[in-house]
Image: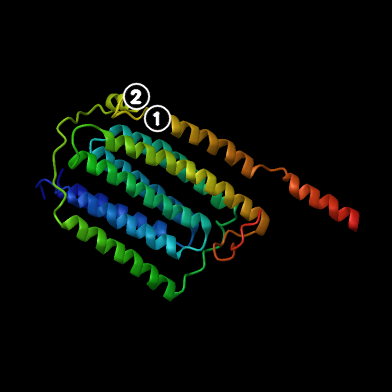
Amino acid sequence: MNEPLDPIRWLQLSAVLFSIAIYGMMTRRNAVGVLMCVEIALNSAALNFVILNRYYAGPGLDGQVMALFVIAVAAAEAVVAIAIFILLYRQSRTVDVNEAGELKL
Amino acid sequence: MNEGIFFVIAIFSFGCAVMAAQARQLLVAAVSLMGLLAATAGIYVLLDADFIAGVQILVYVAGTVVLIVFAVMLTQSGGKEETRPFMRRRLGALAVSGGFLFAALSALASGQLKPSDNASLSSDTVRPIGRLLLSPDAGGYVLPLELISLLLLVVLIGGIVLARADAAPESRDEMRGEGREG
């Protein structure tokens, strides 16, 4: 239990999280639920950057800077998506992705 | 770093992600998402990325999850449970995500990634990140930093414009037109 961890395990964990996010994106009907799965995917992408920077990349912290940008863009995208969901709800009283076929605002 | 800590965090993240991706009550999913993001911040601490861990907590856990809970409440999705997806859809989604997982794991196992311990790591990552973000030379990130600021400004204004409470001018004209014909 005290041997050093093979860093590939972190990358494998990140791949598992991303595939769970894909499952959720394809399965969920509520738009906010789909957004949650997108956030899981973006989070695992940022995690990948940090893992690769720590164990596989050359000197420097570029991976962490990239993770910072991914976090910022994810937050910005969540804002816009939620604004659209609120508008959609006001118009059609539903945020079901199957029923919201026509986005006519 | 030993396997015990990894195992605990991995199981916790996996459980939270599964709950967030398929829980039918959206508030349960939101809280699980918060748990996953906090676990990721813990992973960042283990990977010596302390500044990124702080940003993760501030922006993701204390920002994005709160925003998602607002969205759940404002779209009245908190009361009723989400309808269960049909078995065919679930199997299709499982196939796609399983296929992706297989492709990713086999790519990782192909042995092309060679670990090189990043010897320049110290416990203080704020200063190097700050220098990288502000440096205009070839390895600097000052242009993406400015673009991100612009993006955040646009998103802030756009979000307010999209979600504001008063009616848009087009629907006001519609209402005026209906009044004349009726």
Residue at the image position 51 percent from the left and 68 percent from the top: B83
- Residue B107, compared with residue B126, is above or below; it is below
Sooner in the amino-acid sequence: mark 1 or mark 2: 2
Please tell me which residue lies in front, B181 or B21.
B181
Q: Could you tell me how far apart the alpha carbons at marks 1 and 2 are, in whole angstroms?
A: 8 Å
- Residue B110, position as x, y percentages in the image: 15, 57
Please tell me which residue lies in front, B111 or B25.
B111
- Left/right placement of residue B182 relative to residue B48 reads right
Residue type (three-letter) at the residue carrying disc 2? Pro
Check disc 1: other Cα within 10 Å, few if <14, some if 14-19, many if 20+: few
Question: Which mark is drawn over residue B65?
Answer: none
- Left/right placement of residue A74 relative to residue B121 reads right
Check disc 2: other Cα within 10 Å, few if <14, some if 14-19, many if 20+: few
The quadrant in which the C terminus of chain B is found is bottom right
Residue B139 found in image quarter:
top left
Residue where numbered disc 1 is placed: B143
- Residue B107, position as x, y percentages in the image: 21, 57
Please tell me which residue lies in front, B26 or A18.
A18
- Left/right placement of residue B42 relative to residue A102 reads left
- Furthest toward the bottom, the residue is B88
- Residue B135, compared with residue B65, is above or below; it is above
Q: Secondary structure at mark 2?
A: loop
Residue B181 found in image quarter:
bottom right
Residue type (three-letter) at the residue carrying disc 1? Leu
Residues under numbered marks 1 and 2 in contact, where contact means CB atoms less than 8 Å apart: yes
Residue at the image position 19 percent from the left and 31 percent from the top: B121
Residue at the image position 28 percent from the left and 38 percent from the top: A63
Give the letter of the chain under mark 2.
Answer: B
Question: Which mark is drawn over residue B136?
Answer: 2
